[in-house]
Structures are given as C-alpha cells and as structure tokens.
Image (cartoon, rainbow, N blue to C red):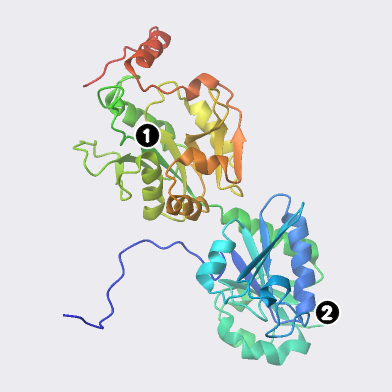
C-alpha cells in the first residue's frame, strides 16, 4: 500500500551547523557599509591564524534578473580562474545545505545580518537603524555581543525586553576595534573541536595471517596499548572494528563499529564522524609497534584546526601518512565527496586537500608491520625491551 505519511529519518547525529557554518555571527542593527567595514577589520586581524569568510548580498551593482557574461548566454555556472583567487558565478538559488558545503573550510563566518541569518548574532545599537532592528528581533536567537554606535548612550529597551540576560553580555563601542577582534579570537579558540581518539583494529591482516591488533608488542594486546597511548591526549578513545568481526573487547575500552562497511580505514574514519560529527579524530592504526607518546604529543601540539587534517610526512614515500592523523570535523564532507566520486583512499584525500604535514621527530615511530618479515625486523628492534608474542 502506498502512503503519503512522512517516514522518520534515520537516527544520524547531525553536525551543529548554523546557516553557513558551525561558527558564525550575523552583525545586525546598523548600515550595511558599517557592517562590511567592521567585518573587514576583524577578518584582516584574524586571517593569518584562522580561515575567515564573509557573507553578504551585492548592493546595487547588478539589477535583479540580469546576469554577467556567460550566465547571460544561458550557462548555469561560470568559472574564472585567477592567480590569487577563483571566482564562480551560479544561475541558481541557494539554500542552507549548499551554503554549508561552500563555507565548509571556514573557521569563522561573519554575515551581514541585514540580508542573512546566522546561528549567533552581534547587535549594533544604532538609532539610524532602530526601526529596522525592531523588524528583525526574531533573528536574535543567540546574541553574544552588543556594540554601541557613536553617541549611542545604551541598549534599546525593546532589546532588553527580548534578552533577559542582556546585562551579562559584553558591550563595547563599535570603535573599540581591538576589543571586538579579541572577542572573536577568543570565541574561535573556544570553539576548537574536542579531540577524540580512534584505534583502527578492524583490518583483516591478510598478509600477516593473524590479527595484528592481538600482537603483544609491549606486554598487552596492541589495540589496547595504542588506546592507552591516546588516553591522556584525547577526550574519549575508541577501538574501531568491523561488524563481521567476532572480537572480544575488554569492557574498560570503548568500541565503535564500522557503519560504512567494506571501505577499510576510510570507512572507519567516516564511521567515527557519523557517530560524533563535531569532534576531531586522532586516527591511529594498530600496526605501529614503535609509535610512542612523544610522537602523538607532537602531533597534537602542532595540530592546525584550520586545515582539514594534521598529519606526518611518511619517511618511506614522502606522502602524507593518513593513519597517524588528526582529522578535523571539516574533513567529513570532504571525505564523503571523494567517496561519491569513487575514491576510498584516505591518502588521496590528504594529497588533494588543504592539510598540515609535519616532519616526524622520530621517523621510526611511523613504521608499520604488515607481514611476518616486517614483524621479524621489529622483533629485532625490540628484543632488548619486552618479549613479543602473538595470538593467531
């Protein structure tokens, strides 16, 4: 039987997006040129450290219904490439889902609140725009800063009425540029995603002949040893495994089952983001017997969250090493985009994206073991330390 009844959505955890981005503010309550000028000052001060973006409408330069260049000839999209930037023109309407995709790389988006909404707001008290602001009070869902235009004595009464905690908000003069910049700088720092850890223990170990996660390089099964290395570096640590694995995991360790099946490490990374899309994930393979705390500490200390990932340069092929990597939340849609184009290789994503690549202080720490021959070499290196056993 066919029914028009709405079907429930799958219980997928959604990222904490606003209209454009996870971290965004609409500046509202004053003239558009004042908003643009303020946004320019903030972006100019923060752009060296953070990926900043701005959203606005064109003001009077293009009449409604007219199109530039090839769009006027019927093209749906026009691209112009320049040495220093890229320009796309689209003949289509946009919704929040498309805006989020286009603004995905940004750490912060400032928005002209006279034309767009955003998850958080900066309210400017400006007598010239009092009436306009009154019409937009429904947009004031999460006001975090109040700015007083020149000669304004205080906050409008109608703003106080809709903001019960208005007296707890920071209030600056709009000319207090340094204070405003510091406000945004602090907000971006606080919004840095929490770091979780994931041990990749779901491999089939076909070349080794038995489960590499069960090898006792350091007195305990390697999957647990790797999880222990990350415990003091991450908010939460999980051990990843396939749905078809019959694997007993000690209760003190959290597990995360692959929900993107048949994709190897790529699927494990996507499964982690599906579970917690607003977290950053330190991904570590379980076949790295020489990996140490110092190497992971160095990775975390040099994490650059404006990139989609922070990783090491492999000493073996000089490519980014995908399985000792911090993947930021903004990498999730990038990974999905590569998958939609038929690629399930994390290394390919890193080589074709904006990433931060580090030189390992101890390159031997990045050595992995896939075959019995490689196992023998590492056994020799560790012979004077702990005995190495395996369960096959």
Instruction: Estimate how packed mark 1 is, as few (under 14), some (14 to 19) or many (20 or more) residues with alpha carbons within 10 Å.
Output: many
State left or right for residue 30 relative to residue 111.
right
Q: Is residue 4 visible?
A: yes
**Which residue is found at the position 51% from the left and 50% from the top?**
331
Give how far across and how far down residue 192 sits, in percent.
56, 52
Residue where numbered disc 1 is placed? 227
Could you give the CA–CA distance between mark 1 and mark 2, rounded to whole angstroms?
56 Å
* Label number found at residue 150: 2
Quarter in which the C terminus is drawn: top left
Helix, strand or loop at label 2? It is loop
- Residue at the bottom extreme, as displayed: 131
- Residue at the front extreme, as displayed: 73
**Which residue is found at the position 83% from the left and 82% from the top?**
151
Check the image and report above or below for 52 versus 212: below
Q: Nearer the viewer, mark 1 or mark 2?
A: 1
Instruction: Estimate how packed mark 2 is, as few (under 14), some (14 to 19) or many (20 or more) residues with alpha carbons within 10 Å.
Output: few
Depth order, front residue of 319/306: 319
Give how far across and how far down residue 95 sits, in percent.
53, 74
Check the image and report above or below for 7 versus 80: below
Q: Quadrant of residue 355?
A: top right
Depth order, front residue of 231/375: 375
State left or right for residue 241 relative to residue 298.
left
**Which residue is found at the position 22% from the left and 38% from the top?**
245
Q: Quadrant of residue 60?
A: bottom right
Helix, strand or loop at label 1? It is helix
Check the image and report above or below for 201 versus 162: above
Q: Is residue 171 visible?
A: no
Give how far across and how far down residue 252 sits, in percent.
28, 39
**Which residue is found at the position 28% from the left and 27% from the top?**
206
State left or right for residue 305 relative to residue 245.
right
- The tag earlier along the polypeptide, 1 or 2, is 2
Check the image and report above or below for 194 versus 16: above
């Amino acid at each position: 039987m066919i029914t028009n009844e709405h079907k429930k959505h799958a219980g997928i955890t959604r990222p904490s997006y606003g209209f454009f981005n996870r971290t965004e503010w609409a500046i509202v309550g004053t003239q558009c040129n004042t908003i643009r000028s303020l946004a320019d000052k903030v972006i100019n001060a923060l752009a060296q450290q953070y990926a900043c973006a701005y959203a606005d409408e064109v003001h009077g330069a293009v009449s409604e219904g007219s199109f530039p260049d090839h769009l006027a000839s019927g093209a749906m999209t026009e691209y112009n490439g320049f040495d220093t930037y890229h320009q796309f023109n689209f003949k289509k309407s946009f919704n929040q889902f498309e805006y989020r995709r286009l603004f995905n790389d940004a750490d912060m988006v400032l928005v002209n609140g006279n034309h767009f909404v955003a998850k958080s707001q900066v309210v400017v008290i400006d007598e010239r725009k009092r009436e306009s602001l009154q019409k937009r009070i429904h947009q004031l869902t999460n006001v975090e800063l109040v700015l007083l235009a020149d000669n304004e004595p205080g906050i409008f009464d109608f703003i106080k009425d809709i903001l019960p905690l208005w007296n707890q908000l920071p209030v600056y003069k709009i000319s207090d540029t340094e204070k405003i910049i510091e406000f945004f700088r602090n907000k971006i720092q606080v919004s840095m995603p929490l770091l979780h850890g994931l041990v990749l223990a779901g491999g089939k170990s076909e070349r080794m002949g038995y489960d590499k996660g069960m090898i006792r390089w350091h007195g305990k099964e390697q999957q647990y040893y790797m999880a222990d290395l990350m415990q003091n570096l991450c908010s939460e640590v999980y051990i990843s495994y396939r749905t078809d694995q019959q694997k007993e995991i000690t209760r003190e360790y959290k597990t995360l089952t692959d929900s993107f099946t048949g994709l190897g490490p790529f699927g494990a990374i996507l499964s982690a983001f599906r579970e917690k899309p607003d977290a950053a994930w330190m991904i570590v393979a379980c076949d790295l017997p020489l990996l140490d705390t110092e190497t992971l500490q160095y990775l975390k200390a040099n994490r650059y969250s404006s990139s989609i990932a922070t990783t090491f340069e492999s000493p073996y092929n000089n490519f980014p090493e995908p399985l000792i990597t911090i993947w930021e939340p903004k990498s999730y849609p990038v990974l999905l985009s590569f998958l939609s184009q038929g690629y399930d290789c994390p290394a390919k994503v890193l080589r074709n994206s904006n990433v931060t690549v580090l030189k390992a202080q101890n390159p031997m720490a990045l050595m992995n073991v896939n075959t019995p021959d490689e196992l023998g070499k590492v056994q020799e290196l560790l012979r004077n330390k702990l005995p190495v056993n395996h369960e096959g």
